[in-house]
Image (tube, rainbow, N blue to C red):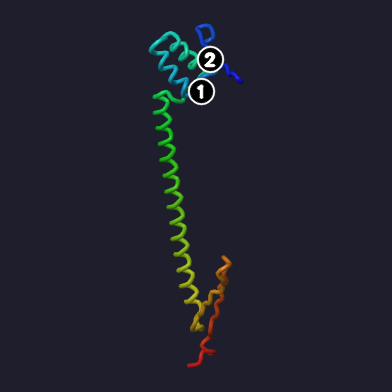
Amino acid sequence: STVGITQNFCSQRNFDIVWTKTRTGRKKMAYKWLCQLDTHYPRLAERARELNRKDGFVMKYEPEEVRKREREEERKRKARKEAKATRREKKRKAKLAGKKSKSASSSRASSTSGSFGIVTTHVVGDRDSKRSRVESRAISPDTVSS
């Protein structure tokens, strides 16, 4: 038969080492332990917080830190949303500008054609290809039979 032995021992002598390992390896348990230390061993709880300050360690489940992270995430979410709206607006304006320039160029083309009566456009493309080809022919009044 097999016997498993674990050793989870902490005293005031080895508290610093145990706390620094626990707070990084078992984050949620470390927070719960700190809450219990506040109740039963306030001096050790203060020592744990002192070690955290000294090392610049921020506990993941500390209520103030959770609120701070949530505010930061909300700020980032709003910034991403605004950036997306800005990109969408730029795209819409570019699309409108493209339509205006196309309509302006087509009106110029029809006014410059002068002697040509009919301009036919034929779009050639197949379903499998993303590319299509536009063929335009200008028919002069001489070739049109009445």
In 3D space, how far apart are the residues under numbered discs 1 and 2 (Cα atoms)? 13 Å
Q: Secondary structure at mark 2?
A: loop
Q: Residue under label 2, please give it.
A: 8
Q: Note whether 50 is above or below 58 in the view shown.
A: above
Residue 133 is drawn in which quadrant?
bottom right
Amino acid type indicated by mark 2: Asn
Q: Could you say where residue 34 lies in the image, as x and y percent from the top left? A: 44, 17
Q: Could you say where residue 115 lies in the image, as x and y percent from the top left? A: 51, 84
The one nearer the camera, 125 or 8, is: 8
Q: Could you say where residue 108 lies in the image, as x and y percent from the top left? A: 48, 72
Q: Residue furthest top?
A: 13
The label nearer to you, 1 versus 2, is 2
Q: Are marks 1 and 2 in contact (CB under 8 Å)?
A: no
Amino acid type indicated by mark 1: Arg
Q: Secondary structure at mark 1?
A: loop
Quarter holding the N terminus is top right
Q: Residue under label 1, please give it.
A: 26
Q: Residue furthest front?
A: 1
